[in-house]
Image: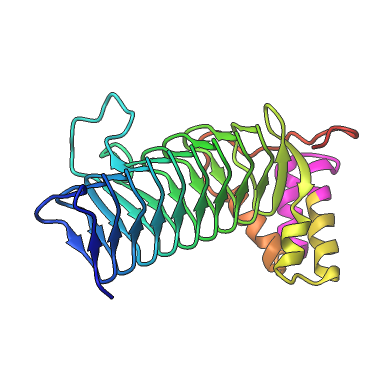
């Protein structure tokens, strides 16, 4: 596992380079960067700050990782960026380091795919196996759960939470928290139901799919007050792990509140 560094690349003294790392033409790697074993920088990649790139990750031309956040309050403090193993970061993607007014760290999980021209703002936390299509933009402090898919051109307002296994349609503007397993679309985002296709791919059985879907319909379209419906579900079906995931997500404190805007009949992708 020989390390290969192209003669036109600039690797500052102090950078930690693992075994089998490939650093292509015209890349720049800062002194506080750690590239774990098998990382590949294809070409023209810029990595700065206290940044760790996990084993086997691959970064494509003109991606920029760990640069200063687009936050006027940032004054050069030492904050961090972490990229998980085997994650692919495509052309012109930008991922900014954290801030001291936030968590101090921007984190991308393992086995993610960030397509061309996507952006992850400061202090975001992105889970494992997340797919961000072209031109997706996450404002600062956004939390994205595992296995979320964000369609091309979609955007999330700062501090929004998107629950695990959610599907965000292309060109969707997300301004409220999205529950796990949801399927949303529109500007501004509306709930279209659950991401049943994603759940089927995970091997969820038909009977449980029906139970979770019925719980969703009761929660978001049933009679009475939303909080009372949530309490009823917890009492009657709280043992179901998927329903409990949704209810726990809803119960977690939120800056913008939970997305409850359900699309009318005929409003779909």
Q: Is residue 265 a member of the stretch shown in magenta?
A: no
The quadrant of the image that shows the C terminus is top right
The quadrant of the image that shows the N terminus is bottom left
Q: Is residue 221 left or right of residue 164?
A: right
> Residue 256 versus residue 45: which sits nearer the camera?
45
| Residue 87 x/y as whole percent | 45, 58
Residue furthest top in the image: 72
214 w.r.t. 91: above or below:
below
| Residue 40 x/y as whole percent | 35, 59
| Residue 239 x/y as whole percent | 70, 69
Q: Residue at x 24, y 30 (%)?
A: 74
Residue furthest bottom in the image: 1
Q: Which residues are magenta?
A: 217-237
Residue furthest left in the image: 13
Q: How is the image coloured?
A: rainbow
Q: Residue at x 47, y 33 (%)?
A: 158
Q: Residue at x 30, y 53 (%)?
A: 24
Q: Is residue 88 left or right of residue 216?
A: left
> Residue 262 versus residue 85: which sits nearer the camera?
85
Instruction: Tell me the chief SS of the magenta region.
Output: helix
Residue furthest right in the image: 265
Q: Is residue 235 a member of the stretch shown in magenta?
A: yes
> Residue 198 versus residue 215: which sits nearer the camera?
198
Q: Residue 173 falls in which quadrant of the image?
A: top right
| Residue 25 x/y as whole percent | 28, 48
Q: Residue at x 28, y 39 (%)?
A: 67
Q: Is residue 89 left or right of residue 7?
A: right
């Amino acid at each position: 596992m020989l390390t290969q560094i192209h003669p036109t690349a600039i690797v500052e003294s102090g950078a930690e380079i693992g075994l089998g790392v490939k650093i292509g033409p015209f890349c720049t790697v800062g002194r506080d960067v750690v590239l774990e074993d098998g990382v590949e920088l294809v070409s023209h990649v810029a990595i700065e700050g206290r940044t760790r790139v996990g084993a086997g990750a691959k970064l494509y031309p003109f991606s920029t990782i760990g640069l200063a956040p687009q936050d006027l309050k940032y004054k050069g403090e030492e904050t961090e960026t972490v990229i998980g193993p085997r994650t692919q970061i495509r052309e012109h993607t930008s991922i900014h380091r954290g801030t001291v007014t936030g968590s101090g760290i921007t984190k991308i999980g393992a086995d993610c795919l960030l397509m061309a021209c996507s952006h992850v703002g400061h202090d975001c936390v992105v889970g494992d196996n997340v797919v961000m299509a072209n031109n997706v933009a996450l404002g600062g402090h956004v939390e994205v759960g595992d296995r979320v898919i964000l369609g091309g051109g979609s955007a999330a307002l700062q501090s929004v939470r998107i629950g695990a296994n959610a599907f965000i349609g292309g060109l969707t503007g997300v301004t409220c928290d999205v529950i796990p397993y949801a399927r949303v679309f529109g500007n501004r985002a509306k709930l279209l139901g659950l991401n049943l296709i994603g759940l089927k791919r995970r091997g969820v059985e038909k009977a449980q799919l029906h139970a979770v879907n019925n719980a969703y319909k009761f929660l978001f379209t049933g009679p009475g007050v939303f909080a009372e419906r949530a309490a009823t579900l917890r009492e009657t079906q709280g043992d179901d792990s998927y329903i409990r995931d949704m209810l726990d997500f809803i119960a977690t404190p939120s800056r913008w509140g939970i997305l409850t805007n359900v699309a009318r009949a005929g409003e779909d992708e």
